[in-house]
Image (spheres, helix red, strand yellow):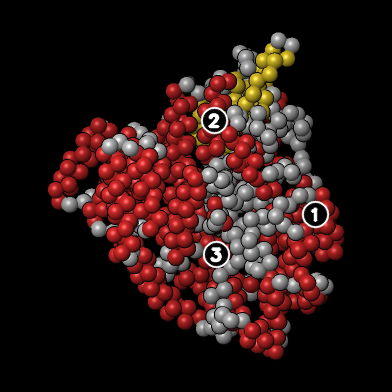
Amino acid sequence: MINLIFFISFSVFAQDLNFNSFFCEEIKKPFFKTVEENGVKYVLPNRSYSRDFKFPINKDKSRKRIFIIGESAAAILYSNKDRPKGQPFNSQKDFEIIDFGMPAYDSGRIRDVFFQSLDFNPDAIVLLSGNNEAFNEPCPGIKAELNRRYLNLFYNISRIFSDEREKLFNYSLEIQKKNISDMAEAAQKHGIKFFITTLPSNLFLPPNGERPYFPAYIKGYSFFDNGEYEKSFSVFNEIISTKKYKNEPFANYYAGLCLFKLSRNIEALEFLSRAAAYDYRMDRASKYRNEALKNLAHNKGAFIADLEGFFRGLSSSPLIKEEFFSDGVHWYKKYNFLVQNFFLGILYKNFNLKKGDISVGYDLTKEEPEISFYYAFSSFAGQSDLENKINERTLYFISKIMKISGKYEKNIKIAQKNLREKKLYGIKKESLLSSLKTYFAEFYRRNGEEKRAVDILNSIPEADRGMLWKKIHFLCAVDLKEKKEIEKNVREDSDKKGFFASYSGLVSVESFYNEEESEEKREEESLEKIIKGDPQKNSKAKKYSDAGVEKLKKNDIKSAVDDFSKALEINPYHAESLLNMAYAKRMQKKFQESLNYYSVITHNANFYKKEIVCSAYLGKAGIHSENRENNIEKEELKKALKFCSHESIKWLKDKLQTMENKSK
């Protein structure tokens, strides 16, 4: 399974969470259950790890019933019981507010909760969704495995071509929009007010993973660390101007940080938003996702709760202040009274009620040091290369910890206490502590205290000195200009243009741009060759595909799908098989799966014959037409115009004109 598919907001889970149970088993259960107490029927959670709620089936007619559904941003917003006291939501006479927020739920899982909640007569539903749309498919079974294979294919292409990152993001966004559209339409049908929330993000959190160590990047880091922000921005902006690195997260992140340091916040917002959107983890909503949700709300007659805009207002800047966040998306709970008041203001306005007293607040400032440590540990979750790469997110949380409490020895004791008390699945606590110490060393190195960093590194037992230790020890040697140590590491490294050679300065910056240009060309040629496929394999794939078509004619869809699957195992890009599989899935009413197969072709349109691409776009348009998504249908038909034959173009133009006339 690829790392992309299973990224979890680890720190907000119960300590004894079993991932498979949470994502795969519990999801099969109804979300709610009812019990009777003293003649009154109540609704309680039925899934493990759910929010603690209890409310009567028959609602109080003097109050509006409000459900909050969503992911961890919803889960941290409100405790259904008065813990802590003084929550604005709890002081309401006009509203009965119940929170069903579930950590790490994506829009598909949230949709499931939404439709079940309709049985309990809400007057309004507030949705918080957008930070978990990175294709969580951790479950066993054929369906999940096929989806993983498709995503794996799509993800690997995205790592080759920069513009594929954008396509990966857009693909994720389309899935989310479809799920939320279903909710909005159902809410409208039931006469329920539906509020779609834009989610705030900490754009100062770095992208996940290790910084690229190409020479041009290293030059940019050096300028940035020395406070030469204009020069650093110039370097990263030049990197971004190349086709392959247009949407590379770290180049955009550092370009944005440079502009922020230069007080050019409006420009910084664009680069930092791109870094968040195209980060492989896709675990922050970003302004692009929020803008799409605003448009969706407008088109579907839903309401917008612009929480992102609210936090910008608090920040008096287009960039939301870093200090509001405990990580990349969760605000500190001490700000919940502000957030709850924000939602109450919207509810009072949209229900045309006289605004009550909503100024109650509380403070939880003591949470900050503890939660920063927890997120530092959490950044290790899901890291298969824990002991090999310098994860910038872990370093970010180490920096936050040191700002709160600048004493290394004290922080190590706190870390040891946390490790004794918390369960971290799949991670050896001993190696984690050594890795954590190594990150503290890197913190000191980046802050100009190389000798302190070396002392910490030398205190780590030799048995725990892996590649992570070796890299940071080497970087200290580079800073301290220890020539023998530098030469030793470069000589031992088999990759003569890798991490050690690049940081030692042995690889030129000029070669980076020359090689990237030729590499892009080679990779495009390689992908074209893969898509065209081996003639013998294509012939075999076609036999299965043709057999599937014959079965489709006999309405044996299940057997046809089996044949198309066999064809695509031989060549995942085989054009006829993709089109046939997409058509079969549409016949089964599995519209999203059908769109997935069409998208393999449309996302690689340059490498297929025009009539094939035309058919794929027309197929996608047909699905959206069947689902009455007229605006999306129209967009797909417009795209088809570029690829369809002259005979089809007249029909397409007439069809589009008819749609335009109807919309007027």
Q: Mark 1 is on which residue type?
A: Leu
Q: Residue at x 73, y 61 (%)?
A: 398
Label 2 CA crowd tier, 10 Å (few <14, some 14–19, many 20+): many
Q: Quadrant of the C terminus?
A: top left
Residue 242, given in percent of the width and then of the height, sits at: 42, 69
- In the rendered image, the vertical position of residue 191 relative to residue 525, given as above or below: above
| Residue linked to disc 2 | 114
Residue 382 lies in quadrant: bottom right
Residue 89, given in percent of the width and then of the height, sits at: 68, 28
Q: Residue at x 70, y 43 (%)?
A: 17
Residue 444, given in percent of the width and then of the height, sits at: 75, 70
Seen from this angle, which residue lies furthest bottom? 484
Label 3 CA crowd tier, 10 Å (few <14, some 14–19, many 20+): many
Q: Mark 3 is on which residue type?
A: Phe
Q: Give the CA separation, mark 2 to mark 3.
A: 36 Å
Q: Give the CA separation, mark 2 to mark 1.
A: 37 Å
Residue 473 lies in quadrant: bottom right
Residue 364 lies in quadrant: top right
Sequence-wise, the earlier of marks 2 and 1 is: 2
